[in-house]
Image (tube, rainbow, N blue to C red):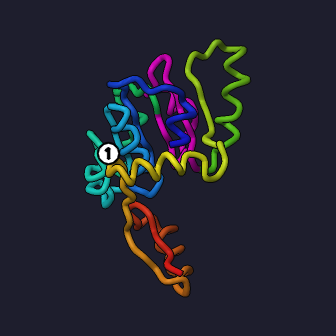
């Protein structure tokens, strides 16, 4: 939700790509983009393609087989839960006035540098970090869930005593959607 809000109003019909779409954040992002009438492409591991389709993705890409930054497609908004590519690669597939919103990943500095660089280069595309803070938008998400317009995709539930196992499962990238810890 923060990623979509950070990029501004998303007009119907916009093309949205979500990198890391098969995880907990990505499955919510797919659904929220579809609620805005966007055409959604989800990118993740091959074993997550089914969950991306189930969440509403119009197109799915297995990152191990296809590098979305090498395609001829153009996206109005890229929501990236991984941010594991150089900025020049993202720019290749961004619409001329497109936006990239980084929700997770390790390449924060290159995204932060795009704003100051744009002042000198005249770059019309925008680059953002989704950093509104914790719990922003939870009330709206709760309302959407209660109205059956949004649902959490839950892969597995672990008891509190098995948190190390849950973390290993998550770190291995095997999860589809959210992992729940029961207390």
Mark 1 lies on a secondary structure that is strand
Classify 50 as above or below 83.
Answer: below
Q: Residue 48, image x and y in percent?
A: 33, 58
Residue at 33% x, 47% y: name it: 149
Residue 27: in magenta span = no
Q: Viewed as shown, does residue 54 lie left or right of 106? A: left
Q: Residue 114, image x and y in percent?
A: 66, 28
Residue at 49% x, 68% y: name it: 170
Badge 1, how many Cα within 10 Å: few under 14, some, many 20+?
many
Q: Viewed as shown, does residue 161 lie left or right of 142? A: right
Residue at 42% x, 50% y: name it: 28
Between 180 and 75, the one lying in front of the other is 180
Residue 88: in magenta span = yes
Whether residue 90 can be seen here: yes
Residue at 61% x, 33% y: name it: 128
Whether residue 62 can be seen here: no
* Residue 107 figure quarter: top right
Between 14 and 110, the one lying in front of the other is 14
Q: Residue 80, image x and y in percent?
A: 50, 43
Stretch of the chain drawn in magenta: 78-104
* Residue 131 figure quarter: top right
User: Label 1: which residue?
Assistant: 61
């Amino acid at each position: 939700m923060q990623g979509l809000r950070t990029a501004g109003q998303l007009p119907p019909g916009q093309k949205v790509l979500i990198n890391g779409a098969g995880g907990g954040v990505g499955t919510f992002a797919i659904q929220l983009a579809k609620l805005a009438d966007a055409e959604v492409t989800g990118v993740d591991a091959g074993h997550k393609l089914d969950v991306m389709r189930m969440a509403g993705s119009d197109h799915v890409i297995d990152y191990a087989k296809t590098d979305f930054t090498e395609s001829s497609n153009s996206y109005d908004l890229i929501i990236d839960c991984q941010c594991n590519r150089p900025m020049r690669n993202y720019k290749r597939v961004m619409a001329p006035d497109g936006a990239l919103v980084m929700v997770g990943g390790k390449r924060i500095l290159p995204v932060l540098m795009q704003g100051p660089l744009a002042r000198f280069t005249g770059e019309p595309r925008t680059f953002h970090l989704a950093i509104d803070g914790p719990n922003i938008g939870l009330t709206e998400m709760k309302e959407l869930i209660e109205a059956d317009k949004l649902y959490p995709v839950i892969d597995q539930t672990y008891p509190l005593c098995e948190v190390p196992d849950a973390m290993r499962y998550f770190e291995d990238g095997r999860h589809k959607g959210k992992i729940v810890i029961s207390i």
